[in-house]
Image (spheres, rainbow, N blue to C red):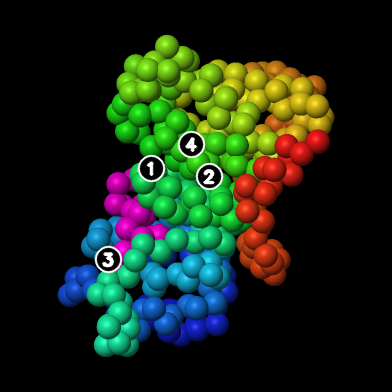
Amino acid sequence: FVLARATPNLEQLYMDNFGVFTGVDSLSPPDDCWSLWTRLQVIRLGRACGALSMGDKRHFPPLHPSSFRVLDARAAHQGNHGDWLPQQLPLDYSGYPAAAAAAAAGGAASAPLVTYPNLERLWMPRLPLSVDLATVLLEPAIRSGRLRELGLCWRQDPGQFFPGALAWLRGAPSVRVFGFFNFDFESHAALTRDPAHRAADPADLLFGFLEAFPNLEVLELHSDLCEPRRIAAVIERAAAAFAARPDGGGGLRRVYQRALTGAPMDQLRASCEAHGVELVYGGWDPAFPVPLEPLGPAEPAEAMMSDMLAP
């Protein structure tokens, strides 16, 4: 909050290897929290250099739905030692009291859950969101046609096949870059509640989910919980499937992975290149500052889908 007051016109913020010292006197935000960082559009967060104090305390002012466009949080997952928890990120402000002026005018006693219809990127490879929070945060940006870059950490909920719970995301025409992280095929094979999925190979289900994106250009798959050859098999199938489309590949041009090295990596690269797809060892890491275009009228996902289906 001190930083926000000192930089009222800040538009993009990148923090890495830093400490957060919030004190323990109160979990309540300052009275001016809703008036801070009204122009902030981009937050990129790396690793904190120490444990973050007070797990339920917000470390950031509320972001403004009309202007905020990119949240990229890549902290390592190590409990609360250098890791971010969802409530510490600028995501959910439903517990914040309304500004004093609004309360005095008879406004709501607490702020509603904030959503971001202009969100263009949410990239959180090591921090799993619940299905409910992911839906609230991302579905408005899918409906508006803004969300183009999405990286999700697989939510390890027993009895639930995570992509199957994201029906609103499946086949979203706005998504150009997609990453899935920390998936565990073995645990989900026997635990899914949906009878239609119980007899299916989870790798087949993940492939079907990826294949449904009509405009996917860049894909990243990584998990320390999954056997590397199974990740490679999904990548190989995806490259072949996109290349077989009538439009000549649907735009898939690059896949990032860290599962294979050496000869297996060379074999997978050759297979991908045969389908016009570049295979890269590593992770998708776009430039900062983020090049942002002026916000124009959003194109609803329904309209985009109709255009695609038109003869």
Q: Is residue 52 above or below residue 281?
A: below
As drawn, 270 above or below 91: above
Residue name at image x 42 percent, y 52 percent: 136
Write down the residue under mark 2: 151
Residue identified by numbered label 4: 167
Count residues near mark 2 (Cα–Cα under 10 Å), then give few for <14, some for 14-19, many for 20+. many
Q: Nearer the viewer, mark 4 or mark 2?
A: 4
Under circle 2, the secondary element is: strand
Question: Label 4 amino acid?
Answer: Ala
Which is more foreground, mark 4 or mark 1? 4
- Which of the numbered marks, if any, corresponds to residue 131? 1
* For marks 4 and 3 on the same chain, the one whose residue lies earlier in the sequence: 3
Amino acid type at circle 3 is: Gly
Point out the frontmost of discs 2 and 3. 3
**Comes first in the chain, label 1 or label 3:** 3
Q: Residue most toward the top?
A: 199
Rendered residue at 64%/65% (across/down): 289
Sequence-earlier tag: 4 or 2: 2
Residue 28 is situated, as x and y percent measured from the top left of the image, at 23, 73
For residue 17: magenta? no
Gap between marks 1 and 2 measured at Cα: 14 Å
Which contiguous range is marked in magenta? 78-97
* Mark 4 vs 1, N-terminal side: 1
Q: Position of residue 296 (x, y in %)?
A: 69, 67
Under circle 3, the secondary element is loop
Task: Using residue 47 as the reference point, say whether residue 142 is left or right of it.
Answer: right
> Along the horizontal axis of the image, is 146 left or right of 19?
right
